[in-house]
Image: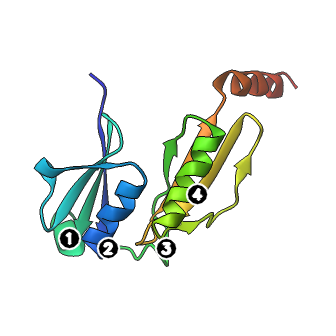
Amino acid sequence: MSKLIFINLPVSDLPKSIAFYEALGAVKNEQFTDHTAACMVFSETIHVMLLTHDKFRQFTPKKIANARETTEVLICMSAESRSDVDGTLANAEAAGGIIDPGPKQDYGFMYGRSFEDPDGHIWEVMWMDMEAAKETMGEMASA
């Protein structure tokens, strides 16, 4: 069985965050959604739990970081193609996200961009041509 990943994010406006992630293609799992949390499903193995601050505080004694001021984690999600990367960023921008808070990454065999969600959490979207990456890495190791 594949391992599942549940990314837990504190959000200030749950309905706004649900709409944002739905615009990116995530599907809300009603079974794990209420007025304090929403489970957003990207794939069979990737789930994002959007938690109100009160709900998030139930899981940690630490202060909730303000993602607009500090970065604790960068979340990276794969894409099927370069155009899929750009399409995801277009959807994020249309839904109110901040586009390319960091530099675009274009190495030929790998292409990535990033966005911030409404709470400032940074997501990277990355495409990689695995065969070209293996060749490039092999050439670098031989040099």
SS at circle 3: loop
The residue under label 3 is 70
61 relative position to 95: left or right: left
Residue 126's image quarter?
top right
Q: Which is nearer the eye, 16 or 55?
A: 16
45 relative position to 60: left or right: right
At label 1, which amino acid type do we have?
Arg
The residue under label 4 is 114
Q: Is residue 84 above or below residue 100?
A: above
Whether residue 70 can be seen here: yes
Q: Residue at x 54, y 61 (%)?
A: 115
The residue under label 2 is 64
Q: If you read the primary sequence from the N terminus, does the residue marked by circle 3 or circle 1 appear first?
A: 1
The residue under label 1 is 57
Q: Residue at x 56, y 58 (%)?
A: 90
Marks 1 and 4, how far apart at CA: 27 Å
At label 3, which amino acid type do we have?
Thr
Q: Are marks 2 and 1 in contact (CB under 8 Å)?
A: yes
Q: Position of residue 133 (x, y in %)?
A: 70, 28
Give the position of the C terminus as an image quadrant. Answer: top right
Q: If you read the primary sequence from the N terminus, does the residue marked by circle 4 or circle 2 appear first?
A: 2
Marks 2 and 1, how far apart at CA: 8 Å
At label 4, which amino acid type do we have?
Ser
Mark 3 or 4, closer to the camera: 4
Marks 2 and 3, how far apart at CA: 11 Å
